[in-house]
Amino acid sequence: MGIFLMGLVIKIMDDFIDKEIDEFKGQWNITSIFKRAILPYSLVLTIISLFLNFSEAVSGFAASYLLGMSSGLNERLPSGLKAWQEGLIFLLLSIYMSSVGDSLAALLIISTIQLIDDFLDLKKDTYIDSRNLIIKLGKFNSLLLTIAFFLLSIKYFPLKCFYYYSAVFLLYLLLYLGENLYRKDRCAN
């Protein structure tokens, strides 16, 4: 449950950052429902996730944050640091607060999930969103990386894979159902 809630927080953060891009693509976005309340809700979910499984929540969030920084490694962020510097700090904090194993597992598993997600979004992102890793790396290289990351994570972290992939499946199912309900409700009004 802790991994699921942190996955929801990561999705909320991603939707908040990509709100304008998603509107342009005609893609559903959680922030369109919760508007300004998205911040307090995501903070409450973060606290509950940390309570339920601190190590997995920290390492999962840090891995997602680090991957989010990968699209513009030399970009200067509001902190004054470059994206790669901030990402490295997050990785070190993750290792310190959880463990090397938890951080590596989260990085491998979430990289796999991110690549799969980018494959699913490829058609929409081709002309709009240059942060898609498949566009940057190429389809063949991305496929090889996805398979390699998946096999490494299954070999070395099978139980964590079960938890992460189960949480992602439930999250996608929830988002799919939520999007359908939201669209039906909007069409009815």
Image (cartoon, rainbow, N blue to C red):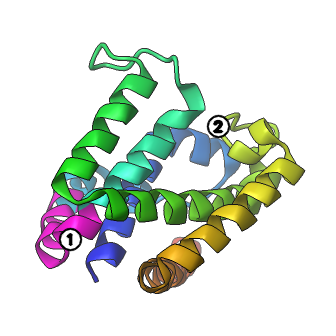
First along the sequence among labels 1 and 2 = 1
Q: Quadrant of the N terminus?
A: bottom left
Give me the disc on residue 49: 1
Q: Main secondary structure of the magenta part?
A: helix
- The residue singled out by tag 2 in the image is 131
Q: Residue at left 47%, top 56%? A: 107
What amino acid is labelled 2 in the image?
Answer: Arg
Q: Closest to the observer: 106 or 183?
A: 106
- Residue range in magenta is 42-57
Against 92, is 118 above or below?
below
Residue 44 within the segment the image draws in magenta:
yes
Q: Position of residue 120 (x, y in %)?
A: 73, 63
- Give percent across and percent down for residue 189: 50, 73
Residue 64 visible in the shown view:
yes
Taking the image as shown, residue 133 lies to the left or right of residue 59, namely right
Queried whether the magenta region covers residue 180, the answer comes back as no
* SS at circle 2: loop
Identified by mark 1, the residue type is Ser
